[in-house]
Structure formats: C-alpha cells, structure tokens
Image (spheres, helix red, strand yellow):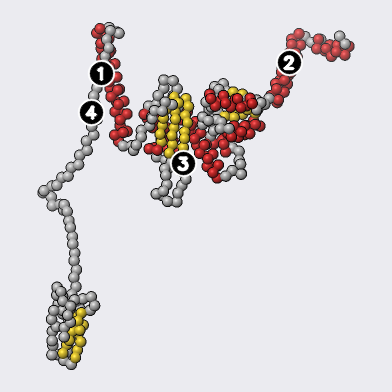
Amino acid sequence: MPEGLKKLLDPFLSLPTSKRLIVAGVAACSLLAFAALIFVANRTDYRPLFANLTTEDAGEIVKKLKDQKVAYQISADGKAILVPSDKVYELRLSLAGEGLPQGGGIGFEIFDRKNFGMTEFVQKLNYQRALQGELSRTIAQLAGVEQARVHLVIPEKSLFKDSEKPPTASVVLKMKSNRTLRENEVQGVVHLVSSAIEGMDTENVTVLDSRGKVLSRTGPSDATGKLTSTMQETQRNYEKNLEERLQSLLDKVVGSGRSVARVSATFDFKQVEKYEEKYDPETAAVRSEQRSEEKAGAPTLLPVFRGCKQIWAGPLRGQAPPVAVPRVTKPSITKSAVPPPASSNRSAA
C-alpha cells in the first residue's frame, strides 16, 4: 500500500467498527445522491404529443416518428405518445400536415402555437377541427364507448334570416364488446353536441354506431315519440317483476330449476284529448257580440240673392243636387237638409 494512501486510511482504520460502518454508509449515500442528480440533470423531458389515440392512429404516429428518428415513449395504456419537449410543436404540425391523427385526437391545443400569417379561412377550419376533436374526446369518455368521431357542418352566416341554413352534426360511435347505449344516453349525446354548437337543434344531430344503425330519433320530436322508449321499458320491467315473483313461488312448490315462468303484459297507453264548452242558462252571459255603425251627412247648398229672390246655386262639387228649390219674398238665409235623389244631375233655376 502506498505511504500516502496509508496515511489517509490510518485515521479511518483507527476508529471503532461501529463508527467505520457509519462513515462508510454516509459516503455510499453521498455517492448515490450525486449519481442520481447527474442522471436527472441529463434526462430528457418528455411531454405528450397526442393523447386519447386509437390503436390505428398510435401505430401510424409511431411509424412516422421512427422514420424521422425521433425518440418517443408510449404511456402504460397505449393511448398517449410522449416526445421530447423541445420537439412537441414541430412534430404536431408535421403530423397534422399528413392528416394524423384521424381519430379526433386534436383539440384546442391546435391554437397553442400562434401563426400570424394564418388566413381567416384556415382559422375557421382549425376551430371546427378543434370542436370536433373536443366533442369526440368528451363522448369517448362515456361508459361503453370505445371510440367516437364527430363531423360538423357549420354554414356561413348570412345577412338575411331567410337564407340562413342551420348547422348539422353527425356522430359515429364505436362501442365496446357487448355494450349498447340506452335511449336516454343517446339523447344525452344529441343534447351535448347541439348545446356545444351555436344555433343547432337536436333534430339536426344524427348518431350512428359502427354498423351503420341509426341510434337517434329522426324527424321532429313530439310527446308520443318521447314516451315510446319509456313505455317499452315500463312494460318490460313489469313483466320481469311478475316473472321473478311467480318463479319464486314455483320454486317453493315444485323445487328449484323444475319450472319456468313467463309473463306477457299488455298496457293501454292511449292518450285522449277532450274539448268541452259549457253554457249556464241561468246566468246572463254574452256569447257573441257584433256592432256596426254608419254615419251619413246631408249636402250643403249655397244661396245666391238677386233682389228679393233667393236662388240656389247648386251643391258643392261631389254632392248631389236638391230635389226642389224654395222661393222666399224676404231676404233671409235658410239652411235646408234635403236628401239627394237617387239619380239626378240637373241644376235648379
């Protein structure tokens, strides 16, 4: 052993065994902490590139990343891909230019990076894509839904109300194995989409499954259509309840597994509307009332005096002439209201 190293170890070796173990443990912990610090400092910071990806989209994105020789990580559930933080936005734009992902993975994060050279048309298109992606993500969170895709048609606004067209939407759902959506859950999806788009009615939202079956009701909604599913569910619940009660009674009499009970119930869901009018003969009530009013005025004659005679010059324009002209011996002014004849257009002398 070299003399210098021996001088360094002599103080340590002169210590008792317990103290030497403590010193050795402290030194080992210090080395491990220093190594961990170096590892963390040199570790690459990974951030999500896309989340909630389908299996097809994740496979295509991984293939593109391998072609570009970019390091990546896949989350435990396989629905998210992580890349180095300094390449997140660049990879998002490059993959979006190639049409990836196709399963509604893009949401409002498309606006994280500002582009001042973007036209108004591209901004509207990106906003529509973001709406479709966010709605797809929300719908995919429902129990039993494996994948959802939303298509929106938002027409341009017009200056005239009559020429405006309502927005429409289509939703395609891929259900998990042996899972179906009930009527109220389908209506929940319809109301979710219609409430997210300004001016959209529930009648303009169509929901399909992966087999092309229409799940939502088509046509205008009315009270009868809304009660159809409720009526069927009520009938099934009533039949099931009776079957269970009958089966329990039969099992006690003939033994378990030796009988089968089936119930078929018929309900009368008729809706009747009555319009009734009652009149009380003992009470004086006005049933109907009609009023008419007419006004008529007599023509006005203008007198002309010549000496002691009064001569009527005739009616005003637009008035019928009088039947007779009175004569007086004294100058006086008289007024007369003589009804005009049925047909006459002569002037009195």
Q: Is residue 127 above or below residue 102?
A: below
Residue 4 visible, this orientation: yes
Q: Secondary structure at mark 4?
A: loop
Question: What label does residue 268 carry, if any?
Answer: 4
Alpha carbon separation for disc pair 1 and 2 = 78 Å
In the rendered image, the quadrant that contains the C terminus is bottom left
Instruction: Name which residue type carries label 3.
Output: Ile
Instruction: Tell me the residue at 16%/91% (across/down).
Output: 308
Q: Secondary structure at mark 1?
A: loop
Q: Are marks 2 and 3 in contact (CB under 8 Å)?
A: no
Question: What label does residue 217 carry, if any?
Answer: none
Q: Secondary structure at mark 2?
A: helix
Instruction: Tell me the residue at 55%/22% (across/down).
Output: 78
Alpha carbon separation for disc pair 2 and 4 = 84 Å
Q: Are marks 2 and 4 in contact (CB under 8 Å)?
A: no
Question: What label does residue 28 carry, if any?
Answer: 2
Quadrant of the image occupied by residue 183: top left
Tell me which label, 3 or 1, sits earlier in the chain.
Answer: 3
x then y, percent, for residue 246: 26, 15
Instruction: Tell me the residue at 23%/32% (across/down).
Output: 270
Q: Mark 1 sits on what residue?
A: 263
Question: What label does residue 154 carry, if any?
Answer: 3
Tell me which label, 2 or 3, sits earlier in the chain.
Answer: 2
Quadrant of the image occupied by residue 109: top right
In the rendered image, the quadrant that contains the N terminus is top right
**Badge 4: how crowded within 10 Å, few (<14), some, or many (20+)?**
few
Which tag is nearer the camera, tag 2 or tag 3?
A: 3
Q: Is residue 84 above or below residue 288?
A: above
x then y, percent, for residue 173: 44, 28
Tell me which label, 2 or 4, sits earlier in the chain.
Answer: 2
Instruction: Name which residue type carries label 2.
Output: Ala
